[in-house]
Image (spheres, rainbow, N blue to C red):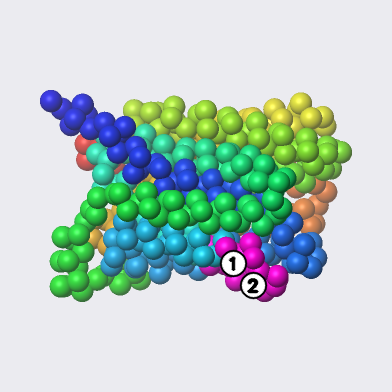
Amino acid sequence: MSAETEFRLRDVAVTAYGPTIVNSIGHGAVMPVLALHARDLGADVATAAFVVALLGIGSMLTSLPAGALIARIGERQALFTVGFVDAAAMVWAGLTQSLLGLGAAVLLSGMAWTTFLMARQGFMIDVVPAHYRARALAGLGGSHRVGIFVGPLLGAGLIHFFGLGSAFLLAAGMSVASALLARMMPDLGASERAEARASGHLPVLSVLRAERRSLATLGVAVIVIGVSRSLRVGLLPLWADHVGLSASTTSLIFAVAGAIDIAFFFPGGWLMDTYGRMVVALPVVASVAVASFVLPLATAAWSVTAVMVLIAVGNGLGSGIVMTIGADTAPVAGRAQYLGGWRLCGDIGNSGGPLLVSAVAAVAPLAIACLVLGVLMVLGTGWVGYWTRQLDVRLRGAGGA
């Protein structure tokens, strides 16, 4: 029997995807109301936006330390621990009457979340054979999308009956449930960690220096992908407001895009495993480039929806692409430390998109800003296409995907 027929993803589906779906439901319930909670505590609009941004700031601050932590305690223990840390942060966020307390809780949640995502990625690298890697990691990205899609629906119902704080308590419960599900995972890599303890763990910076070529080429490609994905959140709501769409209509358009994201994650994983990484990395950025050029022509709900659908198809096909390339390039020794640097690249991209929109829109009308961003995304498409093509050639040469 071949390795491909021996491995069945459904045999590890609960431990592979269960914690991510459950935890993402909690985050999905909180994200739409986090700024509202900050406003209820007395924040102005700018301060409320900063409170939301603290999630990303916490993630960036923790990426490298989280890699070192996972290298020492392993993925299972990391997932179990940060599940309870995140639960405590969500209870704190829901009950505090202090804006400073809310900000601290959100920062702590961001720290726990990035550790959670990195540990999930490391577990999947260990448990899934290379020929199935992209499909498995696309499923991991898809499970996150499912949770983010379901979370606001559950949160809306709870908030209607019990108030805004109930969304944070739901998130706390989901974090505890994810920690308990993670406890069911096998503790892979224990012998390697014991050897590393005996010989001394590799410092994070030495691993990143050794892998600087991958980070300077494919790592930059990941930053570009992160920027392109976050442009949807930074640019589309501004344009919808510019053309007079209501907040409820904009939310509905984003819900449609979220459903399309989910629909395309498995085909994207199959394409990656069958034809290589470039075939899905390219559409993620190229779809945003095209959308940026045509967005100034979208003046009604249907046309804005069409632009969002275009981006969602590209984004859905690229589900798991960042994690997959990270798994492809990660060294055996110092893998967790490397993935910390990889995660930092993604965080820089995710945070950089809204900042880029803000910077360009500050000096140009929104329609011109769309065109400028489209040009930048065309350049980014070229970079992503070239380096992911080089990766595909290298993997085929090594007998990989």
Relative to 355, say whether 236 is above or below.
Answer: above
Which type of secondary structure does the marked residue at label 1 adopt?
Answer: helix
Hey, which residue is sitting farthest right in the picture? 244
- In the rendered structure, find residue 101 and report the number of the disc placed on it: 2
Real-space Cα separation, disc 1 to disc 2, in angstroms: 8 Å
Task: Examine the residues drawn in magenta and state their main secondary structure.
Answer: helix
Q: Is residue 133 left or right of residue 59?
A: left
Q: Is residue 379 left or right of residue 41?
A: left
Question: Which of the two discs, 1 and 2, sits closer to the camera?
Answer: 1
Is residue 179 shown to the viewer in this render?
yes
Residue 384 locus on image (x, y percent): 48, 43
Hey, which residue is sitting farthest left in the picture? 1
Relative to 305, say whether 323 is above or below.
Answer: below
Asked if residue 97 is among those painted magenta in the image, a careful observer would answer yes
Q: Is residue 324 left or right of residue 2?
A: right
Q: Nearer the viewer, residue 168 or 204?
A: 168
- Quadrant into which the N terminus falls: top left
Q: Report the residue at 69% width, 64% height from top.
A: 50
- Quadrant into which the C terminus falls: top left
Q: Report the residue at 86% width, 38% height from top.
A: 244
Residue 390 locus on image (x, y percent): 36, 42
Asked if residue 397 is among those painted magenta in the image, a careful observer would answer no
Q: Give the magenta-colored segment's residue range.
A: 91-109
How busy is the neighbourhood of tag 1: few (under 14 within 10 Å), some, or many (20 plus)? some
Q: Earlier in the sequence, mark 1 or mark 2?
A: 1
The residue carrying mark 1 is 92
Relative to 268, say whether 130 is above or below.
Answer: below
Relative to 368, say whether 215 is above or below.
Answer: below
Q: Nearer the viewer, residue 101 or 275?
A: 101
